[in-house]
Image (tube, grey):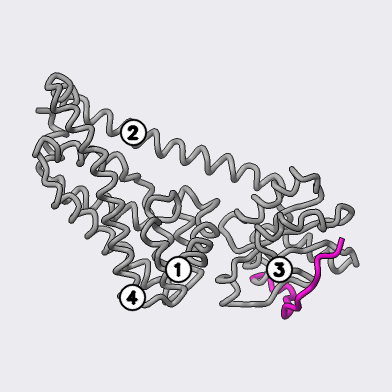
Amino acid sequence: MPLAYDFFLHYAYVILFLWVMGEQLGIPVPSLPLLVASGTLTATHKLSLPLVLFAVVAACFVSDSIWYMLGKRFGGTVVKLVCRLSFESSTCVRKTEDYFTKYGEQALLVAKFVPGLGTVAAPIAGQTGMKYRIFLAYDLAGALFWAATITMIGRFFGDVLRVHPGALSWMGHFAGALFVLAIIGLVGYRVWKQQAFLKQVRTSRLDPVELKRMLDGGQNPYIIDLRHPLDYLPDPRVLPGAIRLSPEGLMQRSGEIPRDRDVILYCTCPSEATAAKMAMKLRQNGIYRVRPLLGGFDQWKKLGFPLEEYEEKAVVA
């Protein structure tokens, strides 16, 4: 029996616990291949299915509880930190906030199935003030549902291999190499996807100092605040003259956005993710003078530039 395979069988439950906990804490080590492999081994009775599920759910309990407590105490700061650790930081904040706004605690039941949501859901639950016992009930139910689904997929493959003993022997010899290749493939794809997105963002961002100079010079840029309602809680103010729109509202009213003025979008996402995505969508709709604000709301505020109380305004072309 190959050494790596033997080692995994001997310490499987500990490895599962530490690996899944590490992923849920934000370390970019995808656990999907490990869960599938564990499920395959349960079909041959080399691992116990209940113990596999227990190890995974226990790992989620520890990591998610930590993030929940940090989110409850430090709010959006922790949420942004989690997303910076994630390879899905281009989407995870806005997507998770939208899930919580629409589904509440029930979002936790499916969060781990959606790339970028599994880790960030816990601190956002804490940030929103969800009671810990409610969070824990839905989070653990979601973790068990996720673990059971992925593991049973692996068990199905294990049942197929058990019918073909030659294939099972072959898998035993090459399981370690296949597992490593699967991990490298998943990580490589996520890195490529993230870098491609960041490259698009970097080419179009507007520096806050430049925007301040435009405002001081009497120019009249059209500024849009794309922050999620949860992001208004720490500070509801906006940049001078800004209007608030959700990404969906912005696209619905894109025909009202002026074409003869600079359009500046800002948010509080890591790497200006939401603002950058919406800027690209507006350009596809023929609005070319649109740019995301570098550092978003947080960087503008950090530089001490002026903010104002928000007054509802109409979108005027």
Q: Amino acid at mark 3?
A: Arg
Q: Position of residue 172 (x, y in %)?
A: 16, 27
- Viewer-side label of 1, 2: 1
Circle 1 residue: 104
Numbered label tally: 4
Q: CA distance from mark 2 to mark 4?
A: 35 Å
In the picture of the structure, the residue carrying the numbered disc 4 is 132
Instruction: State which mark lies toward you, 1 or 4.
Output: 1
Residue 182 badge: 2
- Determine crowd level at label 4: few under 14, some 14-19, many 20+ residues with C-alpha closer than 10 A: some
Please state which of residues 127 and 158 is positioned toward the viewer in this rendering: 158
Q: Quadrant of residue 223?
A: bottom right
- Considering depth in this image, is 224 or 257 the residue closer to the camera? 257
Whole-angstrom CA distance, mark 1 to mark 4, is 14 Å
Reading the image, the residue beneath label 3 is 244
Tell me which label, 1 or 2, sits earlier in the chain: 1
Pointer 3 or 1: first along the chain: 1
